[in-house]
Image (tube, rainbow, N blue to C red):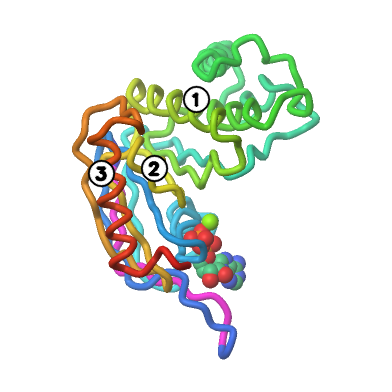
Amino acid sequence: MAEIKVKNLHKEFGVGDDRVVALENVNLDIEGHVFVSIVGPSGCGKSTLLNILSGIETASSGTVDITQDSHDANPGYVFQAARLLPWRSVMENLMFVQKERDDEARARCQRYLDMVQLGDKGDKFPGELSGGMQQRVGIARAFSIEPDVLFMDEPFSHLDAITARSLRRELHEMWKQTKKTVLFVTHDVGEAVELSNRILVFAKGGKLEDDITVDLPFPRDPSDDAVAVAKAQVLRKFEELDLLAT
Ligand SMILES: Nc1ncnc2c1ncn2[C@@H]1O[C@H](COP(=O)(O)OP(=O)(O)O)[C@@H](O)[C@H]1O
Ligand SMILES: [Mg+2]
C-alpha cells in the first residue's frame, strides 16, 4: 500500500511580468488502492503536479511525501505520448527499465504485454505499431516495474474514442488486479467518472477546488444512468467554478 501526502505545495514559473502560479497551496492525502483523477481546464497545473510528485520538476515550496511498500521501486509514469525507444523492440523497451534484466524480468514483461493484449508483439518495433498499441506498450512498461504508485498524464487523449475506451477497460482491469494507487490526469470528465474513486477538481491558478468521491460499483458503463448522473454532478461543479468556459 502506498501513501501520498502533499502539504502546502506551491509552484511558480518565471519572474516579474512572466510570473505564472502553476500550483497554489495544494494539500492532498491519498492512500491505498484508489484510482484518483485530476481534472480541470488546460493550464491549471495538472501536469505540474504530477511532475513534482514524480520528481521531474521541483516545487517552489511545500512538501511531498510518498511512501511505498516496495521501497526501492520509483513510481511509474505514463505520458500523453508513449515515448518508446524506436530502435528497440517492444520487449526491449520493457526490459530497458528493469533493474535486473534476467529471465524473471522477461517473464514479468511478457505478463504485462499479455495484459495489454500485445503478448505476440514483443519482437515488433514501435514504428510497426499503431498509436493505440504504442500507448499500450507504454502502459505495460509502467506496470512492469511493479511500482505501488502510478502517475498517468492524459494517456488516452491522443487516441480515437473507440481505442481510448478499450484501453480504459484494460487499465481498470489492471488497476483492480494489481492494487496500485493511480493518479490519472484527464480533461475528460466522463473518463474520470468511469475510472475513479475520487476526482480532484483543479481551477486556473493551480487551486484544488473540490474533492469528489464517486461511490459507484465497477465496471462503469458510461451509458448507465448512475454514471451519467455522477458525470452531470461533476460538470455542474465545473459550471459553479466557472471552469467550462476555459
Ligand atoms: N516549464 C515551464 N515554464 C514556464 N511555465 C510553465 C512551465 N510548465 C508549465 N508552465 C505553466 O504553468 C501553468 C500550468 O501548466 P500545466 O501544469 O502544464 O497545466 P495543465 O497540465 O493543467 O494543462 C500554465 O500556465 C503553464 O503555462
Ligand atoms: Mg498537462
Is 104 left, or right, of 146 in this rendering?
right
Q: Residue at x 70, y 27 (%)?
A: 130
Q: Residue at x 51, y 78 (%)?
A: 20
Name the foreground residue: 194 vs 38. Answer: 194
Q: Is label 2 in a helix, a strand or a loop?
A: helix
Which residue corresponds to mark 1? Answer: 166
Q: Quadrant of residue 5?
A: bottom left
- Image mark for residue 190: 2
Q: Residue at x 57, y 23 (%)?
A: 100
Disc 3/disc 1 C-alpha distance (Å): 21 Å
Which residue corresponds to mark 3? Answer: 230
Q: Earlier in the sequence, mark 3 or mark 1?
A: 1
Q: Judge: label 1 CB < 8 Å from ligand 2.
A: no
Q: Residue at x 25, y 44 (%)?
A: 230
Could you say where residue 26 lies in the image, as x and y percent from the top left? 32, 66
By secondary structure, the bulk of the magenta-drawn segment is best described as strand
Q: Is label 1 in a helix, a strand or a loop?
A: helix
Could you say where residue 143 lies in the image, as x and y percent from the top left? 48, 28
- Image mark for residue 142: none
Return the residue found at the far left: 215
Q: Is residue 13 in the magenta section?
A: yes
Q: Earlier in the sequence, mark 3 or mark 2?
A: 2
User: Which residues fall within the magenta stretch?
Assistant: 3-15
Amino acid carrying label 1: it is Ser
Name the foreground residue: 157 vs 208. Answer: 157
